[in-house]
């Protein structure tokens, strides 16, 4: 390498990314490391920690604000009712946004390499690299490539006098952004271990309080709460606060990672749960049965690609075509009730409602010239094929049984001959 060779590192100030800084110089021969922290709605303390650690390391540190873009991505996920095994995909949706932002800085700064501190066991390495391997930069994963363990990292940090002893990591491994807060590791790795209340930071233990709000959607996107319009970031933050106060959006799941490992995950996602429930309730009202049935398959594929960090796949463009067409009708208002840790849709209205009160009501005689008696013909036919199939089978079996009884005598005579 000629001149000053630079590498951009996805930097959080935690143990993994902190040890990566000297390792990129020592083991990968880079002259200079740039740390990049991307804001997707982490709590302020995380930026303070990153800033302090970067300073102590004398690291050139960039903070990129990608909150708006990430919030938009989350609301796009709502259009596709996106969850993976019950998880609203906060970390998964954030990684490509973070990866793009870091790549942009790396290219602007003339870096030759780009690095992350992910281990070789998780999903995030795959999501980062899916973005980065589309560039000409050398992709480096020191923790994975050097086979680092936490104990080794702690020892190395002590030896090198790296700024990690500030207790910047508690008992759990936590990943927070606007859409979800994930808690994993330590005792939680045991699927049988019952999590203590203190793993939760966004959600209160559900109390007896009840509250009702109205969420307005325009073409599948939530735009206002109780009539007050809010931009995406603000709307999500507002709901995290409000629904979190009601204990909404906790999940404790066994998650199948991309590499095949099954892991125990705990999440909090009050805004996501509220918006996903409200959106689904509106779709129930405005989409036809066929659209709803088919959309569950489209949504499932969308969520799968989101989990993989591959929303850039051509398949997703095609899925988006279907999703966007259906969302043209997903305009209206949903009433959501927070009660007992749940966010339940308890009312919905839309000018696109595929609903005729007079047609569905028990009290009306005829609608559009169709009267109750007209269903008689339908009722006569309903189940016709099943009845016929069952009858034919029963007859065939009876015939077989009859032949067997007759045949036993024949057999004897056959032996005698
Ligand atoms: N399992 C989730 C995912 O792959 C989230 C992992 C978050 N990481 C953490 N250290 N808590 O999307």
Image (cartoon, rainbow, N blue to C red):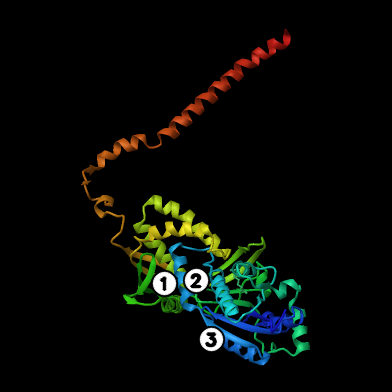
Foreground pick, 240 / 65: 65
The residue carrying pointer 3 sits among few (fewer than 14), some (14 to 19) or many (20 or more) residues within 10 Å by Cα, namely: few
Taking the spot 57% from the left edge, 86% from the top edge, the residue there is: 47
Taking the spot 25% from the left edge, 39% from the top edge, the residue there is: 373
Q: Position of residue 275 (x, y in %)?
A: 43, 69
Taking the spot 61% from the left edge, 64% from the top edge, the residue there is: 254
Label of residue 39 in the image: none
Answer yes or no: is residue 46 visible: no
Disc 2 designates what residue? 249
Q: CA distance from mark 3 to mark 2?
A: 22 Å
- Who comes first in sequence, dot 3 or dot 1? 3
Q: Secondary structure at mark 2?
A: loop
The image quadrant of residue 111 is: bottom right
- Who comes first in sequence, dot 2 or dot 1? 2
Answer yes or no: is residue 349 visible: yes
Pointer 1 residue Cβ closer than 8 Å to ligand 1 = no
The residue carrying pointer 2 sits among few (fewer than 14), some (14 to 19) or many (20 or more) residues within 10 Å by Cα, namely: many
Q: Which tag is nearer the camera, tag 3 or tag 2?
A: 3
The residue carrying pointer 1 sits among few (fewer than 14), some (14 to 19) or many (20 or more) residues within 10 Å by Cα, namely: many
Label of residue 44 in the image: 3
Tell me whether the residue at label 2 lies in contact with that at label 1, contact meaning CB atoms closer than 8 angstroms: no
Q: Position of residue 36 (x, y in %)?
A: 60, 82
Disc 1 designates what residue? 338
The image quadrant of residue 12 is: bottom right
Tell me whether the residue at label 3 lies in contact with that at label 1, contact meaning CB atoms closer than 8 angstroms: no
Q: Is residue 85 left or right of residue 16?
A: left
Foreground pick, 348 / 27: 27
């Amino acid at each position: 390498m000629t001149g000053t060779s630079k590498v951009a590192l996805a930097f959080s100030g935690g143990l993994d990314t902190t040890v990566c800084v000297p390792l990129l110089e020592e083991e990968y021969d880079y002259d200079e490391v740039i740390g990049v922290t991307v804001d997707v709605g982490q709590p302020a303390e995380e930026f303070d920690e990153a800033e302090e650690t970067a300073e102590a390391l004398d690291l050139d540190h960039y903070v990129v604000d990608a909150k708006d873009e990430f919030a938009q991505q989350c609301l796009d996920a709502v259009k596709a009712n996106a969850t993976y095994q019950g998880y609203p995909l906060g970390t998964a949706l954030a990684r490509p946004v973070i990866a793009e932002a870091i790549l942009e800085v790396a290219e602007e700064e003339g870096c030759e390499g780009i690095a992350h501190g992910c281990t070789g066991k998780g999903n995030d390495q795959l999501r980062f690299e899916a973005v980065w391997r589309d560039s000409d930069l050398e992709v480096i994963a020191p923790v994975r490539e050097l086979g680092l363990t936490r104990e080794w990292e702690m020892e190395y940090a002590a030896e090198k006098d790296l700024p990690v002893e500030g207790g910047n990591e508690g008992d759990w491994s936590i990943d927070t952004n606007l859409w979800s807060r994930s808690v994993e590791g330590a005792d939680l790795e045991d699927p049988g271990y019952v999590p203590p209340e203190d793993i939760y930071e966004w959600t209160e233990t559900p109390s007896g309080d009840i509250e009702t709000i109205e969420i307005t959607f325009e073409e599948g996107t939530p735009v206002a709460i109780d009539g007050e319009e809010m931009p995406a970031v603000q709307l999500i933050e507002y709901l995290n606060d409000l629904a979190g106060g009601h204990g909404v959006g906790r999940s404790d799941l066994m998650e199948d990672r991309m590499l095949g490992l099954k892991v125990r995950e705990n999440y909090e996602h009050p805004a996501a749960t509220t918006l996903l429930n409200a959106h689904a309730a509106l779709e129930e009202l405005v989409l036809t049965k066929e659209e709803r049935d088919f959309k569950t398959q489209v949504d499932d594929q969308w969520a799968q690609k989101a989990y993989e960090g591959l929303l850039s796949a051509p398949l997703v463009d095609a899925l988006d075509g279907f999703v966007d067409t259906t969302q043209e009708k997903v305009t209206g208002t949903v009433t959501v009730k927070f009660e007992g840790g749940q966010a339940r849709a308890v009312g919905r209205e839309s000018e696109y409602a595929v609903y005729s009160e007079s047609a569905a009501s028990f009290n009306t005689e005829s609608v559009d010239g169709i009267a109750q008696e007209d269903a008689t013909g339908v009722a006569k036919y309903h189940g016709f094929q099943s009845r016929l199939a069952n009858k034919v089978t029963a007859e065939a079996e009876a015939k077989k049984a009859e032949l067997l009884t007759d045949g036993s005598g024949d057999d004897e005579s056959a032996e005698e001959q």
